[in-house]
Image (cartoon, rainbow, N blue to C red):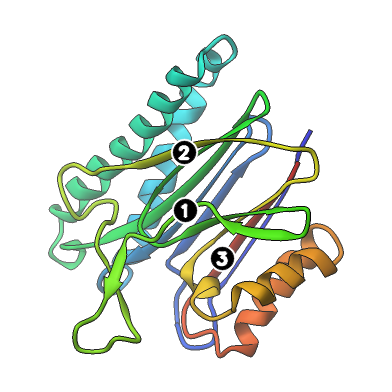
Amino acid sequence: MSDWFSGTDVGLKRSNNEDRVHVDSERGFVILADGMGGTQAGEVASGLAVESIARHLEQNAGFWILAKRQRERATLIDAVRKANRRVFSAAGDRDEQHGMGTTVVVLWIRSGAAHVAHVGDSRLYRLRAARLEAITRDHSTRSPGDPSRFLLTRAVGTESDIEVDHQMIEIARGDVFLLCSDGLSSVVAEEEIRRALVESARGEATVKRLIALAHEGGAPDNVSVALVYC
């Protein structure tokens, strides 16, 4: 049995929140997306992606009961690729949405294993025995004009098709999974994140502490986190 918590915050410099988080504890999955684009296009992209992935997983939940892990892997990848097609199509419908896209990271827990799918630079971490490990690797590169900035090399909705990274990892009792947008990971050092997970009271208190740490660092972007306690 797992416990699930999440929170999202606009940050200190943005006027709107382009992040989206969706938790379905009954079916055992959480989706986090960080949108990008012109005025309000980012929140359109992240909203469409999260809605599409959640619907696909909900519709296929019945098949998961007897499914082998290969089937589960294919279902999750298909969900993200379907979301990519939906966002890409919507981006062509209106000029103000042209070029919009979104990061996506999905964690789906089933039968003692965690399936992870991701595109972009939103991250998944695992805390095990007080050690924090980054499970995902960012799809980004340093900006040639400003090495302190990173540019996405892959995002949902910017191309007609997308390569989706997938991992399956075994779960141990006591594992804690953290999904976050770069509004947290680019501002708060991993050691600070680790300490917050270890030292804060379980659940909502930890969500609030992580968002507060981003605020202490200036919170230049939206901040979103989701926690799963196994």
Q: Secondary structure at mark 2?
A: strand
Q: CA distance from mark 1 to mark 3?
A: 16 Å
Q: Residue at x 66, y 74 (%)?
A: 191
Quarter of the figure that contains the N terminus:
top right
Sequence-wise, the earlier of marks 2 and 3 is 2
Q: Amino acid at mark 1?
A: Thr
Q: Amino acid at mark 3?
A: Ser
Quarter occupied by residue 30: top right
Q: Secondary structure at mark 3?
A: strand
Q: Is residue 11 left or right of residue 195?
A: left
Asked whether the beta carbons under mark 1 and mark 2 sit within 8 Å of each other, the answer is yes
Q: Residue at x 48, y 77 (%)?
A: 186
Q: Residue at x 71, y 59 (%)?
A: 131
Residue 85 image point, x, y percent: 23, 41
Asked whether the beta carbons under mark 1 and mark 3 sit within 8 Å of each other, the answer is no
Q: Is residue 17 above or below residue 49?
A: below
Q: CA distance from mark 1 to mark 2?
A: 9 Å
Sequence-wise, the earlier of marks 1 and 2 is 1
Q: CA distance from mark 2 to mark 3?
A: 22 Å
Q: Is residue 60 above or below residue 7?
A: above
Q: What's the mark number on residue 167? A: 2
Quarter of the figure that contains the C terminus:
top right
Residue 223 image point, x, y percent: 55, 72
Residue under label 1, please give it.
136
Residue under label 3, please give it.
224
Q: Amino acid at mark 2?
A: Gln
